[in-house]
C-alpha cells in the first residue's frame, strides 16, 4: 500500500467521480459530486482524492471551522473508500494518514468527525484509531467523535 493524497482537478475529476460506497453505505455520506459542489461554495473545505500509487481508492474532505470553539475546530468531515477497495485496510490507513496531514496543516491537537449511530463499521474503525464520542450531535443528528493527539502523540505528531 502506497497511500497519497491528490487534489481533485480536471486530470483526475472523472476517475474520482467513479468511486462509490457499497449499497449498504448509501446515505451515510454525500456523493463525491455533491461534496465537490459544496467545496466550491465554501472555501474552507479541502476535498482530496486518496490514491494507492496511481489508483484512486477513496475520497476525503476536511476543513477548519474558525467559528467553533475558542480556536476553531478541525473537521475530518467526509471520508469514503470506494466499494471495490473496501476490506483491504485502506480506511484505517487513510484516516491515520489524514490525521497526520490535518495536524501538520492546522496544528490543532483535536480533530472532529461525525457519524450516524447506526454506521457500526465506521464507528468501530474510528474507535480503533482513537476517536471517542464527546456527547455532542451535529445539525444532521450525527454523533460527534474527537481524537485528542495529546493522548497519542507518538502515533500522529
Image: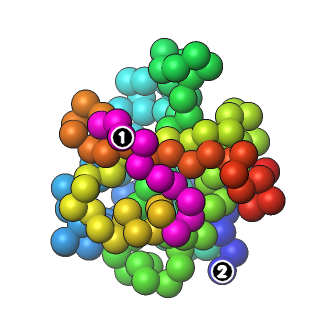
Residue at the spot of label 2: 1
Residue 58 in view, yes or no: no
Q: Is residue 135 magenta?
A: yes
User: Where residue 92 sits in the image (x, y, percent)?
Assistant: 54, 70
Q: Nearer the viewer, residue 9 or 130?
A: 130
Residue 120 in view, yes or no: yes
**The residue stretch that appears in magenta:** 128-137
Q: CA distance from mark 1 to mark 2?
A: 35 Å
Quarter of the image with the N terminus in it: bottom right
Q: Is residue 133 above or below residue 62?
A: below
User: Where residue 114 sits in the image (x, y, percent)?
Assistant: 37, 45
**Colour scheme employed for the rendering of this structure:** rainbow
Q: Nearer the viewer, residue 90 or 5?
A: 90
User: Where residue 130 sits in the image (x, y, percent)?
Assistant: 56, 60
Q: Is residue 33 above or below residue 67?
A: below
User: Where residue 93 sits in the image (x, y, percent)?
Assistant: 60, 70
Which residue is painted at 26% across and 53% down in the image? 116
Q: Is residue 144 above or below residue 106?
A: below
Tell me how many marks there are: 2
Lateral position of residue 8 relative to residue 150, left or right = left
Magenta span: predominant SS is: strand
- Using the rendered view, name the quadrant where residue 95 is placed: bottom right
Which residue is painted at 52% across and 69% down in the image? 128
Which residue is painted at 25% across and 30% down in the image? 139
Q: Residues within 10 Å of mark 2 (few under 14, many from 20)?
A: few
Q: Is residue 31 magenta?
A: no
Precedes in sequence: disc 1 or disc 2: 2
Which residue is painted at 76% across and 42% down in the image? 104
Q: Secondary structure at mark 1?
A: strand
Query: Does the residue at mark 1 contact the one at mark 2 (Cβ under 8 Å)?
Result: no
Residue at the spot of label 1: 135
Amino acid at each position: 500500500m502506497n497511500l497519497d493524497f491528490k487534489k481533485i482537478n480536471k486530470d483526475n475529476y472523472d476517475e474520482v467521480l467513479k468511486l462509490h460506497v457499497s449499497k449498504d453505505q448509501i446515505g451515510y455520506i454525500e456523493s463525491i459530486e455533491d461534496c465537490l459542489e459544496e467545496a466550491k461554495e465554501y472555501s474552507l473545505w479541502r476535498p482530496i482524492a486518496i490514491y494507492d500509487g496511481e489508483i484512486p481508492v477513496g475520497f476525503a474532505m476536511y476543513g477548519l471551522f474558525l467559528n467553533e470553539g475558542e480556536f476553531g475546530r478541525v473537521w475530518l468531515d467526509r471520508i469514503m473508500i470506494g466499494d471495490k477497495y473496501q476490506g483491504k485496510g485502506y480506511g484505517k490507513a487513510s484516516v491515520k494518514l489524514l490525521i497526520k496531514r490535518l495536524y501538520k496543516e492546522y496544528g490543532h491537537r483535536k480533530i472532529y468527525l461525525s457519524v450516524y449511530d447506526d454506521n457500526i463499521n465506521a464507528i468501530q474503525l474510528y474507535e480503533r484509531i482513537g476517536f471517542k464520542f464527546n456527547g455532542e450531535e451535529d445539525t444532521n443528528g450525527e454523533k460527534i467523535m474527537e481524537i485528542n493527539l495529546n493522548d497519542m502523540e507518538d502515533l500522529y505528531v
